[in-house]
Image (spheres, grey):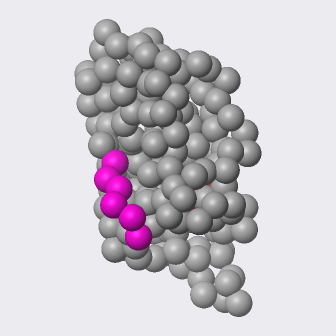
Amino acid sequence: MLMDIEKTLLDEAAIGKRVRELAEQIAADYAGKDLLMVCVLNGAAVFYIDLLMDMQIPLEMNFIRVSSYGAGTESSGTVRILYDLEADITDKHVLIVEDIIDSGRTLKRLSKLLKERGAASVKCCCLLDKPSRRAVEMQADYVGFSVPDEFLVGYGLDYNGKYRNLRFIGTLKPEIYE
Ligand code: PRP
Ligand code: MN
Ligand code: MG
C-alpha cells in the first residue's frame, strides 16, 4: 500500500495537531449544549473518531451514509440516504463531520436535510477543504486544512474504496490510476 504513494501532503503529526486544535475549539463552543456528532460514512470515519476522542464534553454519536452523485439532480437539492441516523435530532445541536468538501454538494444537501428535521442548529466540521472545486456555495464552520486540487488518499479518503487506513494524507502514483 505504501509503495503506491507518490508524496505525503499531511503527515500523522500535522493531522494529529490540527485535530486536537479543532477538538478543543469545538468542545469549548458546544460546552453545555446537547451535542450530536454526525459521521458521514465512510470517508469521515477515521477523522470522526480521532476528533471526538479529543473532546472532553458529553456528546452523542450517530452515523449517516448518503450518495453524493446518485439520484436527484443538482438543482433538486435532495440527498439519497443509504443509511440513516438513529437519533431523533429535534432540538439537538448537530455537528456534521466530513473528511473533505469538494463540490460542496454532499454537505449542502445534508445540512439542509438535517435542518428540516428540526435540529436546534446544524454546523459542519471538515478536515479538508478544496475551495477550488466548489460547484455550490458551501462553507464549513470548522476546517482543518485547505488543500490544493489533487486526488488525495489516506486518513479516511479512498481510491476505489482503498487507502482509507493510512495514517497520513497523500497522493497516489499516476500508474495506480492507469
Ligand atoms: C466524498 C467525501 C465527501 C464528498 C465530498 O465521499 O468523503 O463525503 O465526497 O464531495 P462533494 O463536496 O463534491 O460532495 P464519497 O462520495 O467518495 O463517499 P465515501 O465517503 O464513502 O468515500
Ligand atoms: Mn464521504
Ligand atoms: Mg470516496
Q: Quadrant of residue 5?
A: bottom right
Q: Please identify the dominant SS of the magenta region.
A: loop
The residue furthest front is: 76
Q: The C terminus lies in which quarter of the figure?
A: bottom right
The answer to whether residue 66 is above or below residue 36 is below
Left or right of 69, for residue 148: left
Q: Please tell me which residue is depicted at 50% across the width and 50% down the height of the picture.
A: 109
Left or right of 52, for residue 64: right
The answer to whether residue 136 is above or below residue 38 is below
State the image coordinates of residue 10 (x, y, percent, origin top left).
41, 60
Q: Nearer the viewer, residue 112 or 86?
A: 112
Q: Please tell me which residue is depicted at 52% across the width and 55% down the height of the picture.
A: 77
State the image coordinates of residue 42 (x, y, percent, origin top left).
65, 48
Q: Is residue 73 among the parts visible in the rendering?
A: yes
- Magenta residues, as a range? 135-140
State the image coordinates of residue 157 (x, y, percent, origin top left).
58, 59
The answer to whether residue 1 is above or below residue 118 is below
Q: Please tell me which residue is depicted at 35% across the width and 56% down the height of the picture.
A: 138
Q: Quadrant of residue 72?
A: bottom right
State the image coordinates of residue 8 (x, y, percent, origin top left).
46, 68
Q: Please tell me which residue is depicted at 30% across the width and 43% down the height of the picture.
A: 141
Left or right of 73, for residue 127: left
Q: Is residue 163 among the parts visible in the rendering?
A: no
The answer to whether residue 4 is above or below residue 30 is below
Q: The N terminus lies in which quarter of the figure?
A: bottom right
